[in-house]
Amino acid sequence: MTIFGNVLVTVHFTADYLSRGRSKSFRAITLLGMTNNDVLYISKADAEWWRTAVIYQIYPRSFADGNGDGMGDLKGVTTRLESLQELGVDAIWFSPFFKSPQKDAGYDVSDYKDIDPLFGNLADFDELLARAHALGLRIIVDLVPNHSSDQHEWFQAALKSPKGSPEREMYIFRDGKGWFGRKAPNNWPSVFGGSQWTRITEPNGKKGQWYLHIFDSSQPDLNWENERVRDEFDKVLQFWLDRGVDGFRIDVAHGMIKRAGLPDTKTISTEMGGAKAEADMTIEELEVANPYWGQPEVHAINRRWRKIIDSYNDRAMAAEAWVLPLERMARWVRPDEYNQTFNFGYMFAGWNKEAQIKSIEESFEAFGAVGAPSTWVLSNHDTIRHVTRYGMTGNLPQGDGIGPSYAQPDEALGLRKGRASTAFMLGLPGGAYIYQGEELGLPEHTTLEGKYRQDPTYFRTKGERVGRDGCRVPLPWEAGVNESNGFSSTGESWLPQPDSYKRYARDLQRGIAGSTLELYKRLLKERKEHNLGGGNFRWALEFTDEHSLAYVNNGVAVIANFGPEPVQLPAGEVLVTTQVDLTAEHELEHDQVVWIKLS
Ligand code: NOJ
């Protein structure tokens, strides 16, 4: 079978491929799954930019501080943009910088058409955009439509207005259950801990209705059944498109519609997609089990926005649609919906041979079937940095953070595996995401004290889950120039860096052969040179043995060694390798990856 970027073309089926079929049996895949060297994926020829782009995520609080107050800002980004051009990425996705009380680090927006003073103003944004475009970098902004801040004027008006009023209809208000409505309307759990419902005090001073918030109580969910909400967001999209942005990353693109009647959830899962824990269910069963994730009516909103996007030239939108299995996620990237979506399946696949085979095949199959490229991603601002995940030898008590009392990672092991997994990932056709700092091999801050924590998860679970602050720590730019290693001119930093960050500073790595920064630069350069983003993928059985795994994309063999013994490499020009001293014997050691241009 061959999956083309825009059509599913059956060349021939191997018996094995047929037997795998849908996601349930897919899970049982063994290494025998790699039965031949058929081309599995061919990119669409006239590739739109987003089909192959490498997109760098900037977390504005922590990238670079331009005014010395310890908080990253837009001016700080503008002065450091050249480093991203030098790195070789194609686009930047900014986590939110809109006006916000910052209860969830900007994912609680109080004005969708303005910049938070913490980060600057609209003029700073225009300057940044112009500079980025001049450097050949596209800009994607993060839109948060599932919920607003409770300080948004719409919510404030709703609180002041009576039950049943048009103002309340902007959000999801319900009467409570039981005696005097004291009980929450249903059993839905907040992703950040506790209930999804908070009771308000009515304008007459009495306890009254409850409002829904999938996340923190400062993030009330908007009512997307209400046409006024849809109209308002059309205008928000147009506002930023008119300003010249190249696209959007849409937050919680799977949460906006709730199942009619708001029935109790059958599985009390607080995971973002609510799907990981229920991997044996069909998609339809998942829709019923999680009445607030991935409801089918959300696709009408996707289509409405796609029309807006397509009415401008060359723009794109990416979904944070955290619904698994990938076959389900692929519904968000059907031809008239999102252009691409984060591949959370791949993010958590794990660095081992079997998992890589399964996840890569599943990705090509699911996204290829709807004509979308796959994206590849290992880290972001919600997840433990992958170099740290791979350095954990014991079980992780939680998925989104590591605290000082937990077992600590093996830093060297994590870095080795992290570099290898990135090198394996960046050779794959499709789009790719890089989270700020991973080009430095930056680890998670795993010993951050409670007094510094800001993630609402930490507070809503009373410290039981430490939350995501550890992956959001400001970047080190110049080792030792001050307390923040050059993040700010004053040494201020809204979260303290761990001591190790000094060793990872950009200036120590720039131009140094074998450094992680130079590795990323080389990977991105060769990826572009050989058009791997737009390439054709096949497994390479001829370079694969019991412990190694190889694929060929556009004539470049990408080989990983997962086993203890060194692997003999084929002839050809070594384009890039994670192994700092590739031996004269041309052998690849364990947890190392090499790209070889086949002769
Ligand atoms: C997903 C974002 O990535 C995360 O950081 C945020 O807390 C939630 N959505 C709520 O907006």
Image: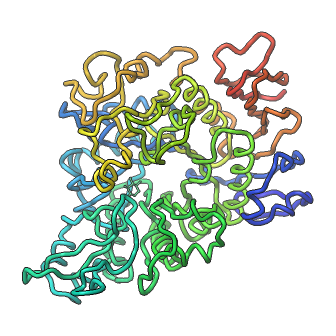
In the displayed structure, 282 sits above or below 446; it is: below
Please report the residue visible at 43 percent of the width from the left and 63 percent of the height from the top. 252
Where 55 falls versus 68 (above or below)? Answer: below
- Tell which of 220 and 466 is nearer to you: 466
Counting from the top left corner in percent of width and height, residue 588 is at 75, 21
Residue at the extreme left of the image, as rendered: 204
Q: Quadrant of the C terminus?
A: top right
The residue positioned 20% from the left and 55% from the top of the image is 101
**Residue 535 visible to the viewer:** no
In the drawing, does residue 152 fall left or right of residue 285?
A: left
Q: What's the residue at 29%, 77% (across, down)? A: 171
Q: Position of residue 115 (x, y in %)?
A: 24, 52
* Residue 108, image x, y percentages: 28, 59
Kindly indicate the quadrant of the structure image that contains residue 10. Answer: bottom right
Q: Is 201 placed left or right of 408 in the picture?
A: left
Q: Residue 67: horizontal and vertical position, in percent? A: 19, 33
Quadrant of residue 282 within the rendered picture:
bottom right
Ligand 1, image quadrant it occupies: bottom left
Residue 558 visible: yes
Residue at the outermost bottom position? 164
- Please state the total of marks drawn on the protein image: 0
Taking the image as shown, residue 462 lies to the left or right of residue 556, namely left
Could you say which is closer to the camera, residue 517 or residue 108? 108
Residue toward you, 282 or 153: 282
> Which residue sits furthest top?
584
Quadrant housing the N terminus: bottom right
Colour scheme of the rendered structure: rainbow
Lateral position of residue 413 relative to residue 427, left or right: left
